[in-house]
Image: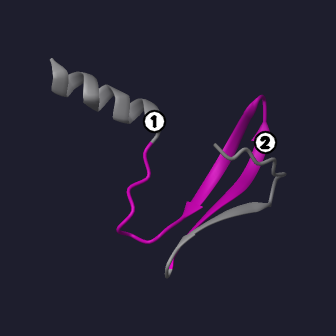
Amino acid sequence: MLVLERKSGESIIIKNGDDVIEIKIDKEQKGAVKLAFDAPMNYVILRKELTEQNNEKKSN
């Protein structure tokens, strides 16, 4: 696992070949961070808890 520290307005770039995903720290307040994602349309970006809920529904 890679752990990075960023400030408001700073970004993280994830690159795979020609595909580039930019994750920008939009703002921090009240113990939460607002992230902005810029990624190709063929990528699905989900909150982890949504994937866990879908897995629970499939196993029932």
Q: CA distance from mark 1 to mark 2?
A: 20 Å
**Residue 34: x %, y % from top left:** 67, 45
> Which residues are the magenta region?
19-46
For the residue labelled by badge 1, is the local secondary structure a helix, a strand or a loop? helix
Q: Is residue 7 above or below residue 56?
A: below
Residue 23, picture quadrant: bottom right
Instruction: Work out whether residue 24 or residue 5 is closer to the camera in this orientation and state it.
Output: 5
Q: Residue at x 21, y 24 (%)?
A: 57
Q: Is residue 39 above or below residue 55?
A: below
| Circle 2 Cα neighbour tier, 10 Å, few/some/many (<14 / 14–19 / ≥20) | few
Q: Which image quarter holds the N terminus?
A: top right
* Residue 54 within the magenta-colored segment of the rendering: no
Residue 21, picture quadrant: bottom right
Mark nearer the N terminus (1 vs 2)? 2
Left or right side of 12 for 52: left
Q: Which residue is mark 2?
A: 28
* Residue 27 within the magenta-colored segment of the rendering: yes
